[in-house]
Amino acid sequence: MPELVYPPVIAAAKTMFRVLDLKITVEGAHHVPRTGGAVLASNHVSYLDFIFCGLGAHPAKRLVRFMAKQSVFRHKVSGPLMRGMRHIPVDRRAGAGSYATAVSALRRGEVVGVFPEATISRSFTVKELKSGATRMAQEAGVPVLPVALWGTQRLWTKGRPRTLTRRHTPITILVGEPMDPAGYPDANAMTAELKHRLAALVDRAQREYPEAPAGPDDSWWLPAHLGGTAPTPEEAAALDAGPRRTSPA
């Protein structure tokens, strides 16, 4: 089936990146296989992460089919685009169907993109990972590649206003070495190793990032352990949980 939607969307995104003069650095793209199935497992700090994660596979001339929540597919603007690019809707109330669709795509030789943290990390550190990415890879017999994104949160993230017209922002995309599922006894062991590798890549991207906050009011996008004012992982978990109801005395 010809790709009628994905290439024009990529071309439009690249044009916008040039207009905004985003300073995009991609390293490790040679790890993405040019043929055959693979899972790209990325950290999640921005609503735009799927765009930049997909760029990590573009040098290998691969189009990534991302797993995304079903509501995105119901939107009158994003829905037709998501369907046209053959992304995979995820219904969290009936996840087995989405999982089966992703495994089938991997077996057909597709590259599937997953955010195993499930939601954006408010602390900008790697949260606990769901095991779906590694379970899919093991069932389909394909590698998992950790992908670290950094700088995307400065454009649009949870709890902050969108700054989609921000110019000259550095964006880092690091693609790690592939993980062969045959080398792990089970999905849980592979997930633990994936988190270790992903955290190391994210830490490297953060420490090598070419810009620092302009001042105290600009330090929100840096994690607390590096001197920023982002919530700590514990504070972020409390924010994600929301206010708890208390029983009457």
Image (spheres, rainbow, N blue to C red):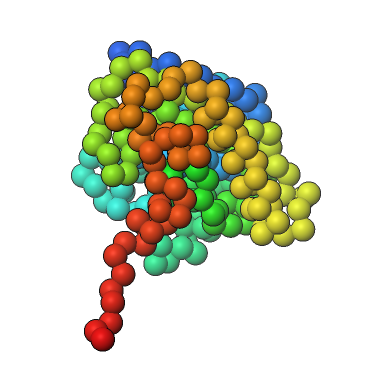
In this orientation, does residue 145 appear? no
Residue that extends furthest to the left in the rendered view of this protein = 76
* Relative depth, front residue between 77 and 224: 224
Residue at 66%, 53% (x, y): give it. 192
* Relative depth, front residue between 47 and 35: 47
In this orientation, does residue 42 appear? yes
Horizontal arrangement in the rendering, residue 183 relative to residue 152 (left or right): right
Residue at 30%, 53% (x, y): give it. 71
Residue at 37%, 52% (x, y): give it. 69
Residue at 23%, 40% (x, y): give it. 77
* Relative depth, front residue between 235 and 58: 235
Horizontal arrangement in the rendering, residue 222 relative to residue 147 (left or right): left
Picture mark count:
0
* Relative depth, front residue between 128 and 98: 128
Image quadrant in which you'd find residue 32: top right
Quarter holding the C terminus is bottom left
Image quadrant in which you'd find residue 243: bottom left
Residue 55 spot, x, y in % from top left: 48, 27
Residue 105 spot, x, y in % from top left: 55, 47
* Whether residue 45 is situated above or below residue 204 in the rendered picture: below
Residue 139 spot, x, y in % from top left: 66, 56
* Whether residue 183 is situated above or below residue 40 in the rendered picture: below
Residue 94 spot, x, y in % from top left: 42, 66
Horizontal arrangement in the rendering, residue 242 relative to residue 200 (left or right): left
Residue that extends furthest to the bottom in the rendered view of this protein = 249
